[in-house]
Amino acid sequence: MDVKRLASAFLRMMRRLRPPRRLKLTREGKYFIAVTFGVGFVGILTANNLLYVLLGILLSLIVVSGVLSEASLRSLRVTRKLPHRAQVGRAHLVEIEVHNDKKRMPSYAIEVEDLRAGQPADKRCFFLKVSPGASQVAAYRRIPGRRGLDRHVGFRVATRFPFGFFEKSREFSHSGDLIIYPAVDPVTLPVSSGGVHASAGRTRRRGVGDEITGLRAMREGDDPRDIYWKRSTAGDTKVVMERASEVLDKAYLTIDNLMEGQQPSEEETQSFERRIRETASLAVAHLRRGEQVFLRTTSGGQVAASPAHGSDGALRFLALLEMEREGTTGTPSVRLLGEAADPPLGSFERAPHASVTVAPVHLSRPALPQQLAPVPDFDGDPVEENSQP
């Protein structure tokens, strides 16, 4: 116990002793330092007064560089503006604003690097001049490569003003969260009720079903098999039958997120990411068709989304979903910084005795209706699902 206390006290002391500024030599600065040492060495060997004067000028440039760079970094406030939505494979902009609180002196050549937890800092914004009491805004473009929660922890502010021999930097703490939604591919949903989803209720829409909703005059492109001959023989105009298609108003999707071992293998992780992408594509397609979507994981997590509220709830749920061991309590709710409460994701209604388990598939082309094997429902009873072409 004493060793742990000593170690923590030592770490606290080291953090306090860490300088507030970091200094790094540039390539030009290395040449400048080499020339300075060379002039000083030759001046000592030859006792030449002109070399001493030149050495003093070179050393004074180093002092002036440190003073002016420190003045540029002082009294700066940096904030960021994150987008409301971000998605894998789609570019989004992050705005960086720098405000100079100094009353008289401007800041020159300010470079701001956005820091994210667990990821390399690869995006920077450059500000040539920030006038005293003024603000400057710049933005960088980023294309996320993976879904999940991006935690922005702060900024690294640096400058090479005035001569470019040294790069002096300091770090600011500024937290921010951004959820990266999974990628969504175009998906072709089946017209009939078989195959990919199930519903407690059905709505009638015009389509290719068996039920007849009305009659109308025949137009170019209509199927001749739909001609209603009892009316067509009475006049010169042919009449066709309008058929109804039973479109399900609720779609239930189940995704398997349980793993066998302590840590998932690389193959399991890739397969799980494909299932996430497949489920997100199906959910968005059902919502665009005006159907409610109910998502559920095998570990117990669940969420509901409706066309009135959009696909944010379902995509956020899938973005934060991770693989879990069997027996866990389900996916925990993640609250972003600055949020007073979790956003309303809707209530999950109990599904009827039918569901669909999303299988790992490649979405290099739009998914087509396919025959699905019998899958267990939410109570564990096997259910037969018949696909109709």
Image (cartoon, helix red, strand yellow):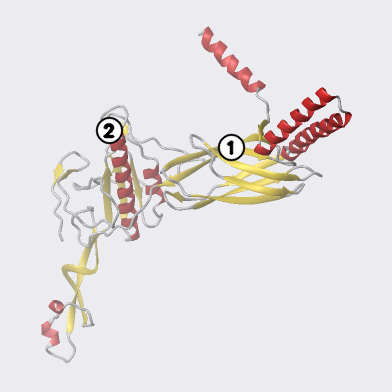
Q: Secondary structure at mark 2?
A: strand
Q: In percent of the image, x 23 and y 45: which residue is there?
A: 357
Task: Name the residue carrying label 1.
Answer: 154
Tag 2 residue: 259
Q: Residue furthest top?
A: 2
Residue 300 seen in the current view = no
Q: Residues within 10 Å of mark 1 (few under 14, many from 20)?
A: many
Left or right relative to 278: residue 369? left
Q: Position of residue 266 (x, y in %)?
A: 31, 35
Q: Residue at x 19, y 69 (%)?
A: 208
Q: Quadrant of residue 101?
A: top right
> What's under tag 2, amino acid-wise?
Met
Q: Nearer the viewer, residue 150 or 271?
A: 271
69 and 252: which one is in front?
69
Q: Specify the quadrant of the image occupied by residue 342.
A: top left
* Residue 176 image-quadrant placement: top right
Place of residue 163 in the rendered image (x, y in percent of width and height, measured from the top left): 74, 41
- Work out whether residue 276 can be spotted: yes
Looking at numbered disc 1 in the image, what kind of residue is underneath it? Answer: Gly
How many angstroms separate mark 1 from mark 2 (CA)?
35 Å
Q: Nearer the viewer, residue 386 or 139?
A: 139
Q: How many marks?
A: 2
